[in-house]
Image (spheres, grey):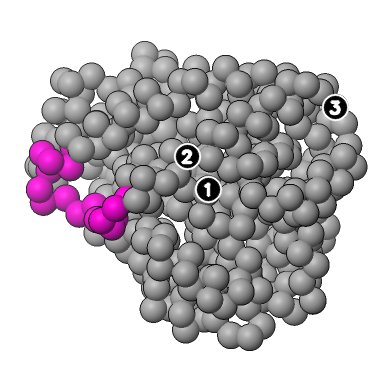
Amino acid sequence: GDSIEEFEQKFAKYIDRKYGLAFPFARTAIYYALKAKNFPPGSEILMPPITIKAMLDIVLNLKLVPVFVDVDPETLCFDMMQLKQSINSNTKAALITYLFGIVPALDEITALCKENDIFMIEDFSQCLNGKYNGRKVGGFGDVGVYSSSSIKTLDTYGGGLLVCDDKDLCMKLREFQSKLMSPSRMMLIKKIITGIVRNIATQRIVFTFIVFPLLRLLALTRSESVLKHTGERDVNMIDRLPGDWFTAFTSFQAKFGIEALSKIDANDKVRAGNVNYIKNNTSSTRYPSGVNGSENVYWQLLAYFESPKETQEYFHSNKIDTSTTSLVKISTLQAYPYQGITPNADRLYANGFFIPSYPGLSKKELAYICHVLNNKK
């Protein structure tokens, strides 16, 4: 109803776009954006090697061909050289993903897409409020898509928000949106419970005395899944897209989103300040450098380390929670018909660890994190 429209408009304005539409998931928004373009079967879509597996599922469901472009270790987005080499006359779209809140050189990427008539989708789920030359990400491509799921900076108990400036495209998307099914009350309750449990689990005292000891115990029995940020994901191929991907965004979620929008800027400022403090005080730790002109929001602060298991054990023994990403390396899934050679993504996937930098950290804790990083052999 009205609150959904109000939230869509507020979000679009926040990103400085004309139109906003709310879907149940970011994957659903991207699915419909591609469907609205009606690309011929076999059209190639340039894709990141690391994202959620659902992105691959929707591309294949639309009978499109994924082409994996390796990442640049400094921006965690497409490697420009490989991006240029991957474009041909059959390239119809590119899914630009800003991993962990780092902003790449968007002038180059945007120019390349325009030059080659490539439909540019920005997935800024981990980079809300990131900027390039003063302009917010989500405002560069033909469409911008944001996942407002739990653990994101704007969490509406699930949801995918799409922004664009093209009126005709917006009308097509509205038509798709109007055909979404009503979600069951149970499904919404489940999402809310998941969000609440995650929030409680990450509260300082609960995490320190209950969750963290459990993670350490789990590390002894299932070390691979403990390395991941939110555990292992299912990597099997699916026959059809699940029904809950096509249920409507609710006014309850919208009301929650309107309220949450006002708190993002302050939290981002604190987190970016924490990151700068850590980076300035840990000269021997290697972080992605980003590019000039970008304002990164560091949804997660990533650092590169050799020996993943020993690294995690070192941090855990010093009572610092760390993990690798729980996104999926979709460029090497054996169950799927398409693979890619992506050595930089392989390294990022295995050797990129998250360093705590969330807004709730005290100065004393930040100093301790730096101390532990500086003593890492």
- Residue picked out by circle 1: 138
Depth check: 225 or 27 in front?
Answer: 27
Q: Residue 242, image x and y in percent?
A: 81, 48
What's the amino acid at mark 3? Ser
* Between discs 2 and 1, the one toward the N terminus: 2
- Residue picked out by circle 3: 184
Residue 128 — which label? 2
User: Does residue 75 show up?
Assistant: yes
- Which quadrant would the N terminus be assigned to in this image? top right
Residue 76 — which label? none
Residue extent of the magenta highlight: 278-294
Alpha carbons under labels 1 and 3: distance apart:
30 Å
Please say if 154 is above or below 61.
above
334 lies left or right of 242: left
Q: Residue 264, image x and y in percent?
A: 45, 26
For label 1, the SS is: loop
User: Does residue 237 show up?
Assistant: no
* Between discs 3 and 2, the one toward the N terminus: 2
Q: Which residue is drawn at 70% across and 48% down?
A: 29
What's the amino acid at mark 2? Leu
Alpha carbons under labels 3 and 2: distance apart:
29 Å
